[in-house]
């Protein structure tokens, strides 16, 4: 790193619309009241929002039944991914990003069946 230039390793969603298309049921559970303009609604935010709503007990009944305790797993994966990024381990972060997306896809399939 330079004196003025900082180097960071980060993860972000490049196309939020694809998140809504890929996981429409989960998107609806997370943001059933709509989204806030100017606020990011990407993969990490979807996972965090589902985990937080689960923790607070404010998911709709359909969501509680479909997701079970899996939102806790989402939360753990997000934390692991952020830790890998903070520790400058991009290969680990990459592996965890795929795992997080796989879990979201599994949950989407479960939620669609409800």
Image (spheres, grey):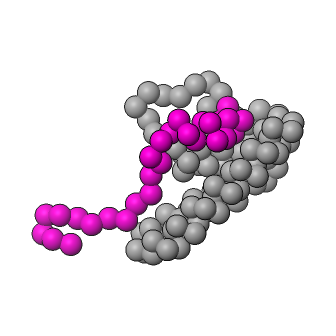
Question: Relative to the observer, which residue lies in front, 71 or 14?
Answer: 14
> Which residues lie in the magenta part?
1-28
As displayed, is residue 88 above or below residue 59? Answer: below
How many discs appear? 0
Residue shown at the point (61%, 49%) measured from the top left: 47
Residue shown at the point (52%, 67%) measured from the top left: 94
As displayed, is residue 70 above or below residue 64? Answer: below
Q: Is residue 2 magenta?
A: yes
Residue shown at the point (49%, 63%) measured from the top left: 82
| Residue 63 picture location, percent across and down | 78, 38
> In this orientation, does residue 33 appear?
yes
Q: Relative to residue 66, is residue 96 drawn left or right?
A: left
User: Where is residue 4, by image quadrant?
Assistant: bottom left
> In this orientation, does residue 72 appear?
no
As displayed, is residue 90 above or below residue 13? Answer: below
Position of the C terminus by quadrant:
top right
Residue shown at the point (56%, 48%) measured from the top left: 43
Q: Is residue 80 magenta?
A: no
| Residue 56 picture location, percent across and down | 68, 42
Q: Relative to residue 9, is residue 84 drawn left or right?
A: right
Question: Relative to the observer, which residue lies in front, 54 or 46?
Answer: 46
Position of the N terminus by quadrant:
bottom left
| Residue 39 picture location, percent across and down | 44, 35
Outermost residue, top side: 33
Question: Relative to the observer, which residue lies in front, 51 or 88?
Answer: 88
């Amino acid at each position: 790193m330079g004196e003025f230039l900082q180097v960071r390793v980060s993860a972000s969603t490049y196309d939020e619309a694809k998140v809504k298309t890929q996981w429409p049921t989960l998107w609806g559970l997370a943001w059933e009241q709509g989204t806030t303009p100017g606020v990011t609604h990407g993969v990490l935010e979807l996972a965090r929002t589902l985990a937080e709503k689960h923790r607070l007990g404010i998911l709709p009944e359909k969501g509680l039944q479909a997701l079970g305790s899996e939102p806790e797993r989402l939360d753990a994966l997000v934390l692991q991914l952020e830790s890998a990024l903070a520790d400058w381990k991009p290969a680990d972060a990459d592996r965890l990003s795929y795992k997080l997306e796989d879990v979201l896809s599994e949950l989407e399939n479960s939620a669609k069946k409800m």
